[in-house]
Amino acid sequence: AQSVAQPEDQVNVAEGNPLTVKCTYSVSGNPYLFWYVQYPNRGLQFLLKYITGDNLVKGSYGFEAEFNKSQTSFHLKKPSALVSDSALYFCAVRGDTGRRALTFGSGTRLQVQP
Amino acid sequence: GAGVSQTPSNKVTEKGKYVELRCDPISGHTALYWYRQSLGQGPEFLIYFQGTGAADDSGLPNDRFFAVRPEGSVSTLKIQRTERGDSAVYLCASSLSPGPSYEQYFGPGTRLTVT
């Protein structure tokens, strides 16, 4: 079975400050990890993914994520938050065996204050 | 290029009625997925198609739910005898390949409300 935990329902940061949205996972085999963002009344938008290789992956809109195998974590980061980054963020995982579909976390609402 | 499209965007139906939700994936994408998202939760897997066949339907909650993809492109999710608990946003996604490294692209969803 595979699972994702996003321990924070909401993260509040001031504009210009760095942000981190946490994610830990459990999966059989090698993990494939994804971050998606959801704006109000819109579908999920792909941000970035980890497949293999460098533990720090870069994605859209200045976001990056750090894969840590020993801690089974894949935290989303951005050096300087924008008010427009305020949205709902989902971490997702799938393994290289078994189910093809993604397993999502419950989401973290990011609120960036001006 | 065109993304994943879903129709209708909103559907209100009475308990016990039958509904169909349509998904038009990105052209050339062979894998198609249906998810359901309830308020305050992440999407939950329903069914996955590779080509025309349902490769994994283990997420369908019961036999009132059924989906087809007859020509390997457009897919329809069908719900019989709808119940109030079926109210949710139904998301469709497609990917170029079912391989684990391929990201899925999501449509805007259909918000189903059962009264």
Image (cartoon, helix red, strand yellow):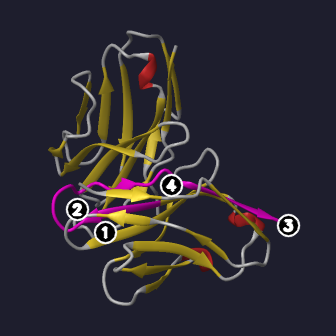
Is the C-beta separation of discs 2 and 4 under 8 Å? no
Q: What residue type is labelled 1?
A: Tyr
Q: Residue furthest bottom?
A: A54
Q: Which label number is shown at residue B102? A: 1
**Disc 3 residue crowd, few under 14, some 14–19, many 20+, Cα 10 Å:** few
Q: How many angstroms separate mark 3 from mark 4 (CA)?
A: 25 Å
Q: Is residue A101 magenta?
A: yes
Is the C-beta separation of discs 2 and 3 under 8 Å? no
Q: Which residue lies furthest to the front in this view?
A: A71
**Disc 4 residue crowd, few under 14, some 14–19, many 20+, Cα 10 Å:** many
Provide the residue designation for mark 2. Answer: B98
Q: How many angstroms separate mark 2 from mark 3 (CA)?
A: 41 Å
Q: Which label number is shown at residue A114? A: 3
State which region is magenta. A91-114
Provide the residue designation for mark 4. Answer: A44
Left or right: B114 with respect to A19?
left
Q: In this view, does B12 lie above or below A67?
A: above
Q: What residue type is labelled 4?
A: Leu
Q: Is residue A40 magenta?
A: no
Are discs 2 and 1 located on one and the same chain?
yes
Q: Which amino acid does label 3 sit on?
A: Pro
Rendering quarter of residue B76: top left
Q: How many angstroms separate mark 1 from mark 3 (CA)?
A: 36 Å
